[in-house]
Image (spheres, grey):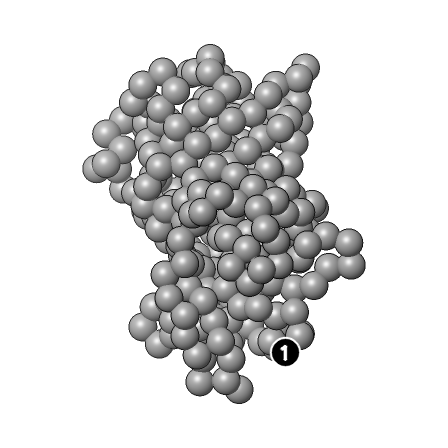
Amino acid sequence: MDFTFYKYQGTGNDFVLIDNREAFFPKKDTALVAKICDRRFGVGADGLILLENHPSADFKMVYYNSDGHLSTMCGNGGRCISHFAKFLNIISEKATFQAVDGMHETIVKEDWVSLKMNDVATVNVFENHIFLNTGSPHHVALVSNLQEFNVFDNGKTIRNTTYGKEGSNINFVEQEAAAVFAVRTYERGVENETFSCGTGVTAVAIAMFETGKTSQNKVTLKTPGGTLQVRFEKEADCYKNVYLEGPAIQVFKGIWK
């Protein structure tokens, strides 16, 4: 089966995007998805995303991790598929789409995409970490000397021993300024550190505000793949109007043989 695909990246978090509005893609073929995402035997990506028709929204987003399995919400993927929808002339600038965690709104201005995330009502603060769900589960921990920190080993251990088979994404954070944080993330499903994680930096921004590390509701997050911004409003105990903002870039187009 031959089909066209597009490679995207959002601050180094990379994806294979496929226009599946004609429903040709074998969605249950876990091995095929994993092979496409393989960096030696396939295209290479942190995940694969299908753009599909939706009865009332502009489109539907179906997201797979690089292990081939359907996964929870991917923030950078949501920004990339919005750019893709504009490229396909499905939208002009604003979009509404359905993802696994519900409906989302986006604004696409050239290669900059602003994605509205779901409200966050629960932030669990523990002695050495914070846990919250921003469409995907996230463990957030402050560390020193993040650049030299062993993200893979520590992230893998916490992901498996603390959260078991279902797992959690693990974020390690170092504060650089009043509202600037460096972030490195170990992602479940990829089972490795990624260059960036959209739901992860969203979780970090909210966690840092919740614990008083910043008093600002617009936070800059520096990842190995680039810089993202998260802004939000806190009403009572709920974080609302949460936006993940940053670049989404189409890298190349190809044909899978």
From where the camera sits, is residue 107 visible?
A: yes
> Percent from the top left, x then y, of residue 160?
47, 48
**Residue at the right extreme, as displayed:** 55
Image vertical order of residue 187 relative to residue 202, above or below: below
Residue drawn at x 51%, y 33% is: 203
Residue drawn at x 49%, y 76% is: 4
Residue drawn at x 42%, y 47% is: 111
Q: Quick one: SS at disc 1?
A: loop
Residue drawn at x 41%, y 70% is: 253
Quadrant for residue 151, please give it.
top left
Image vertical order of residue 202 relative to residue 247, above or below: above
Q: Which is more toward the observer, 169 or 27?
A: 27
> Percent from the top left, x then y, of residue 106?
59, 43
Quadrant for residue 177, please give it.
top left
**Residue at the left extreme, as displayed:** 148
From where the camera sits, is residue 74 visible?
A: no
Q: Of the residues shown, which amino acid type is indicated by label 1? A: Phe
Is residue 118 shown left or right of residue 194?
right
Is residue 137 shown left or right of residue 201?
right
Q: Which is more toward the observer, 231 or 29?
A: 231
Q: Which is more toward the observer, 87 or 219?
A: 87
Tally of marks: 1
> Percent from the top left, x then y, of residue 245?
47, 37
Q: Which residue is mark 1?
A: 24
Image quarter in which the C terminus is found: bottom left
> Percent from the top left, x then y, of residue 255?
43, 79
Image vertical order of residue 6 relative to residue 95, above or below: below
Mark 1 surroundings within 10 Å by alpha-carbon count, few (fewer than 14), some (14 through 19), many (20 or more): few
